[in-house]
Amino acid sequence: MNMKFSPSALEFYPAQWLDAYKKAGTLPNDIIDVAYGDYETFALQSPPKGKMLGVNDDGLPAWVDAPAPPPMPVSEHRQNAFDWIDATADRIRASDRSVGQYLNAEYQLVAQALIDYRNNPEGEVPDAIRSYAAAEGLAIDAAAQQIAEAAARVQELLQAVRRIRLAGKAAIRDAGDDANFMETARPYIDQLNKIPTGS
């Protein structure tokens, strides 16, 4: 197959389709003859790493150095560090299992049941406490005590995570634009990772 090449468009054109390109007004005016092997090399194969299709000094297709990607904006670097701290904080919070099966929405239900039970110990035992006691093979008072201890641990964990997360984000926010934001975040990440959880 006879192939043509446009150095300006960096495109290959089969010779038998030139009339169609001309009629469509899409045929560059600088097309040249090239070997079919050039088409196979430069149009049908991926460029080597760090290279892109260009032209050599003779205007023929050639692999040339690809330009370096533009530098990431400072705001994006800063946001990446924020995201790292937030993701670590989320992971630490999610890893806590100190309240057993009672996490998230279930934990809120149990925590409220504990308050209700403590406010009215002579009344009906809330189902959330009764079911936890049955599941763990505990007396009602022992189950309530475990839930209370777990709730205290959860509150301590959440407060510690929040304190470190906000301090880390403040440090990143206040760092100069030339700072390495990931290194600024690292001490806070390390602190988060050292928080003991009930997992």
Image (tube, helix red, strand yellow):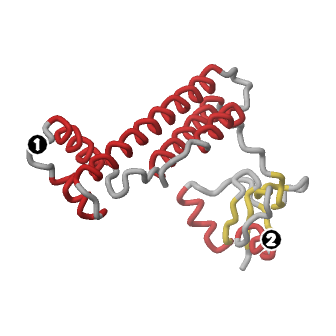
Would you identify the image quadrant in which residue 121 lies? top left
Pick whichever, 18 or 14, lies toward us: 14
Which residue does the image show at 55% across and 39% down from the upper left?
A: 83
Q: Is residue 19 left or right of residue 159?
A: right
Would you identify the image quadrant in which residue 47 lies? bottom right
> Type of residue at label 1?
Glu
Pick whichever, 109 or 136, lies toward us: 136
> Quick check: marks 2 and 1 in contact, CB under 8 Å?
no
Which residue does the image show at 79% across and 60% down from the upper left?
A: 49
**Whole-Å distance between the Cαs marked 2 and 1?**
90 Å
5 w.r.t. 163: above or below: below
The image's mark for residue 38 is 2
Q: Where is residue 48 in the image (x, y as percent from the top left)?
A: 80, 64
Would you identify the image quadrant in which residue 100 lies? bottom left
177 w.r.t. 129: above or below: above
> Which corner quadrant holds the N terminus?
bottom right
> Type of residue at label 2?
Asp
82 w.r.t. 197: above or below: above
Outermost residue to the right: 57
Name the residue carrying label 1: 122
